[in-house]
Structures are given as structure tokens and as C-alpha cells.
Image (spheres, rainbow, N blue to C red):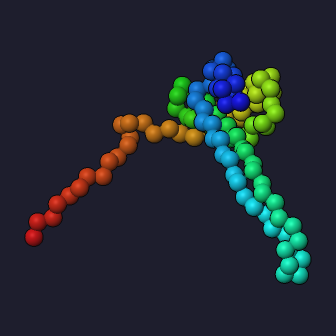
Amino acid sequence: MIEKLTAVLRDSGVHAWEITDTETESWEFYFIRHKLDQNRAVNVRHVKLTVYETTDGGQTLGAATAEVPLTADEAEMAALVKDLSYRASLVKRRTAKRSTLRRSRARSCTP
């Protein structure tokens, strides 16, 4: 699935992306009046996609995030990427220029 999603992202022409694949294993216990009634093991997988787009000639950077269904085919992934790209283009966050970044300098004090 990750390989298909990566191929769709490469073909879409988005500026940048981030894929987060998380698998969670947990146990659930159900009690009735302090007595264990039922228990089960739960294994859940979540794939989240963040798409980044630049606007205003690279002056602003926008991001949009959504969860990709595990059963999605390539057409659904392409539609999701297109929608996220559009949403990210609406966000206007200023990017820091190298000339405006200030670095803290260590100063020595002499008595």
C-alpha cells in the first residue's frame, strides 16, 4: 500500500509529503461488577498522509493531513492527494528566509 501511495504522490507533482504508518497492538478488558467478563486483543493500522504545497513563489508553505483508508485503490488515493494538495495551497504560512534567521551567539563575561 505504501508503495502505491508513493507512486501516486510522485505522479501528482506535489511539493513534498510525509507518510506516517502506525500499527497499534492493545488489549481490551470488559468487567462486570469487578469480574472479568470478556477480553480481546486489538491490532489497528493507521496510515496518515501530509501534503505540503508552496504558494506565492515559495514565500508560503501550506500543509494538509488526512488518513488514507487501507482499502483504497489507486484512483481513490489520487483523488485524496488532489484534494489534500488543494487544501494545502489554501494555507498561507510564511517560511523563514535564511537572511532573517537569527542565531544566538554565546557571549563570554569577564569579571
Residue 91 visible? no
Q: Is residue 60 left or right of residue 25?
A: left
Q: Measured from the top left, where is residue 86 in percent x and y?
A: 71, 30
Q: Is residue 109 above or below residue 21?
A: below
> Which quadrant is home to the C terminus?
bottom left
**Percent of width and height locating residue 105:** 26, 52
Residue 77 in sight from this viewpoint: yes
Please identify the residue farthest to the left as the structure is shown.
Answer: 111
* Left or right of residue 39: residue 67: left
Location of the N terminus (image quadrant): top right
Q: Residue 50: name its quadrant.
A: top right
Q: Residue at x 54, y 25 (%)?
A: 57
Residue at x-position 50% and y-position 38%: 95
Q: Disc count in the image?
A: 0
Residue sitting nearer the eye, 91 or 71: 71
User: Residue 61 appears at what percent x and percent y?
Assistant: 57, 35
- Residue projecting furthest to the top: 11
User: Can you give x and y, in whole percent of width and height, for residue 82 in the image?
Assistant: 73, 26
Q: Nearer the viewer, residue 24 or 20?
A: 24
Which residue is at 86% across, 78% downward? 35
Horizontally, residue 104 falls left or right of residue 9, namely left
44 to 19, vertically: above or below: below
Q: Residue furthest bottom?
A: 33
Of residue 91 and residue 7, the one placed in the foreground of this image is 7
Q: Is residue 109 above or below residue 92?
A: below
Q: Residue at x 63, y 21 (%)?
A: 10
Query: Does 14 sit above or below residue 111?
Result: above
